[in-house]
Amino acid sequence: MTSDPEDARAVSPTRLDELRDRTEARISLGAVGSGIPTRAALRFNLDHARAREAVWTGMDAAALRTALGPAGESAIEVYSEASDRAEYLRRPDLGRTLSQGSRNALGAAVGTGGFDIAFVVADGLSATAVALNAAPLAKVLGDKASAAGWTVAPVVIAHQARVALGDWICAELKARCVVVLVGERPGLSAADSLGAYVTFDARPGTPDSARNCVSNIRSGGLPVDAAAAQITGLITLMMAQKISGVRLKRQDLLSEAGPG
């Protein structure tokens, strides 16, 4: 059997350069004997160290408050039932449950009223993503919410938090909609990716199918302004339809939100 000459033909260096420019994936690293070049090996080790650092480093709440500006002054810090980072990583269930002390603090903040939107900044699995991207995105979202006439709860800074912790926060603050800005699980090509999970009428026990997600918010991914436009578009649809997740009708989202 003869092989197809097209299959046997080597890919030109120019073509490989074009492919590398289109992706952050590790392709065409080269070879030195039976191994990879030193530069590629060192880069892999560096990216692996960055991913581990993103997972294990605690969120700097004081720096986040400063970066949030006026919104940071009134921000409320809350904690899940995970006592530390190690337990948080071993027990995802604890990261989804709000501590009793935090519930009391939120209850005192809301009084007898309520809000249209609650914004939550959660460490998740990448404190790096939060440090770089959360405050800029929260500021733009706050401006867009004010322009839309929505009432906004004090920003909540959540420690040792999984996405579902936002359900408890939404319920305690009596908010119609919650937006959780959370550090996404880091990979070897990006350790700084932020995700935004938007849920209407969130309550403890809300299934993941009732959420909408905008992900890969970072330099080199989805820009902050574009992410804010998509998130605001989602909230607008949710307020109109009083639903979120897979049942939300999203056909007009992109045209309504636009790129900026």
Image: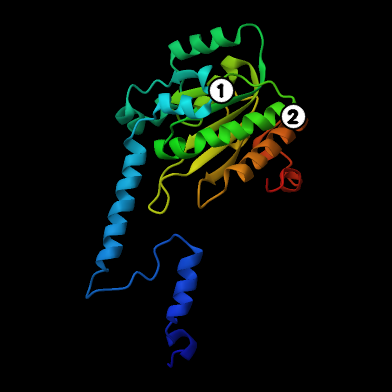
Pick the front one: 208 or 166? 166
**Quadrant of the snapshot with the N terminus:** bottom left
Q: Position of residue 28 (x, y in %)?
A: 38, 71
Label 1 neighbourhood size at 10 Å, few (<14), some (14-19), many (20+)? some
Q: Position of residue 235 (x, y in %)?
A: 69, 33
Can you say whether 28 is above or below 119 in the image? Answer: below
Task: Name the residue: 44% across, 35% down.
Answer: 131
Q: Which residue is mark 2?
A: 148
For numbered disc 1, what is the local secondary structure?
A: helix
Pick the front one: 201 or 109? 109
Question: Real-space Cα distance between discs 2 and 1?
Answer: 18 Å
| First reached walking from the N terminus: tag 2 or tag 1 | 1
Three-letter code for the amino acid on which mark 2 is drawn: Ala
Q: Position of residue 122 (x, y in %)?
A: 47, 30
Left or right, residue 172 beside residue 248: left
| Residue occupying the far left of the picture | 33
Q: Position of residue 39 (x, y in %)?
A: 28, 64
Image mark for residue 71: 1
Q: Nearer the viewer, mark 2 or mark 1?
A: 1
Pick the front one: 50 or 73? 73
| Residue occupying the far bottom of the picture | 2
Which image quarter: residue 234?
Answer: top right
Left or right, residue 104 beside residue 253: left
Task: Name the residue: 46% across, 14% down.
Answer: 102
